[in-house]
Image: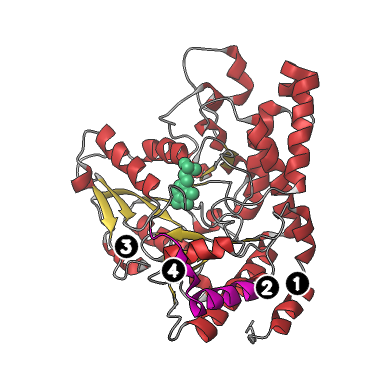
Amino acid sequence: MENTFDSSEECALRMDREDPLARFRDQFYIPEGIIYMDGNSLGLLSKDAESVVNRVLNEWKQLVIRGWLEAQQPWFYFAERLGAMASQFVGASPNEVIATGTTTINIHSLVSTFYQPADMRTRIIADELNFPTDIYALRSQVMLKNLDPAKHLILVQSSDGRTLHEDTIAKQMDERVVLALLPSVLYRSGQLLDIPYLTRKAHEHGIIIGFDCSHSVGAIPHYLDDWDVDFAMWCSYKYMNGGPGAPAFLYINRRHFERMPMLTGWFGYVKNKQFDMLIDFEHEKSAGGWQISSPSILSSAALEGSLSLLLDAGIKRIRVKSLKMTSYLMFLIDKMLSHEPYNFRIGTPSEDHRRGGHVAIEHKEAWRICEALKTASVIPDFRLPDILRFAPVALYNTYHELWQIVHLLKDIIDHKKYEQFSPTRKEIS
Ligand SMILES: *Cc1c(COP(=O)(O)O)cnc(C)c1O
């Protein structure tokens, strides 16, 4: 559908009035007077998440140990239950997804299963634009096999520092490669990679392929089974609104259930025999087999609430609104702020099918402009070297907020308000 925007305030207000997801904003705690644009780093607390946390606190208070089996959502099955909920919007079967660990731990756990270098096949393909923790984990996985990451971890280069060409990645795929791990959406530019194409190419060469979907789950529908992806992982504190440090998820295609988890722990044991406490390890033949430790129940509670909200809204409707919001923001920036003296530049692909849930705006004074925006009660974030990221989240942001932000940016440049801030960055930007 073609969007017909104009730069009037009335256009923004009209889109808010006509927004089928508008009612969800009231389900969230939005800090008073703040325009929150950082949902791709830490999503907001919903009333639904809060109420499940309160429920579980009460269960702990009253049931204590019996909560493992007798809580409303028995804690022993909490991770499986969350996995089944999340499977509905990543296009997987319930037993292919589990809430467990953290993103980086899940990378280690899945890559250790799939990275079995032999003879000629020793390489891992990743890319130089991925979130650094993914690269750190891959490098140590290569070293664990006594191989040199400089030779065996191939980081596909970007030609413009923002985006990756799928064909450049595919060109690295040959019989020397064991596995590829790529991001679904690049955390800086917001580019969405062509996951089905890359998966097809990898499989043509007998390569196992996984995706880190931290920047896409909750914002974009996924069809992991249909795309035939081998494995995936993602965090749940960004677009899934699970709260700081919430359990992450992993997906493992059912054709790999028999493979051996290599970072084993007792929660990966065959579920109905876990408490037999046998010394020989036998893994559950589902995503649950890749669990390691006792699930973090209090954080899982928040996730139950936020997942029910996402399911209620529907991931397809979320994507429609998210795309409309990001294209509206890019339209306003382009129309009002791309020329002298503003000189903002959009670093995110303009085609809908190549864009995730946020927009990257580049400016040589990005850091100080970010500080000036915060003073004006807008919370975006800054990424090196010169990027401001704005994530208009379908469940709680409005078109009018985007209209306001663009006018605030204009005002910051018109009156050189950024000049009053120090050019030195803080620890967490
Ligand atoms: C957010 C994010 C992570 C976070 O890793 P944690 O282990 O959850 O701290 C990892 N990878 C990508 C691509 C991310 O976007």
Q: Which mark is residue 169?
A: 3
For the point 40% across and 54% down, the residue is: 425
Give the percent coordinates (x, y) of residue 28.
74, 53
Tell us which disc is closer to us: 1 or 2. Answer: 2
Q: Which residue is mark 1?
A: 19
Secondary structure of the residue carrying numbered label 3? helix
Q: Is residue 265 above or below residue 142?
A: above
Residue at which label 4 appears? 419
Q: Is mark 2 within 8 Å of ligand 1?
A: no
Q: Magenta includes 417? A: yes
Dot 2 surroundings within 10 Å: few (below 14), some, or many (20 or more)?
many
Counting residues from the start of the chain, the first of labels 3 and 4 encountered is 3
318 lies left or right of 346 = right
Q: Nearer the viewer, mark 3 or mark 1?
A: 1
Q: Kindly indicate whether the residue at mark 2 contacts the one at mark 1 (C-beta within 8 angstroms).
A: yes
Q: Name which residue type carries label 1.
A: Asp
Q: What is the distance, in whole Å, between disc 4 and disc 1 at their CAs? A: 38 Å
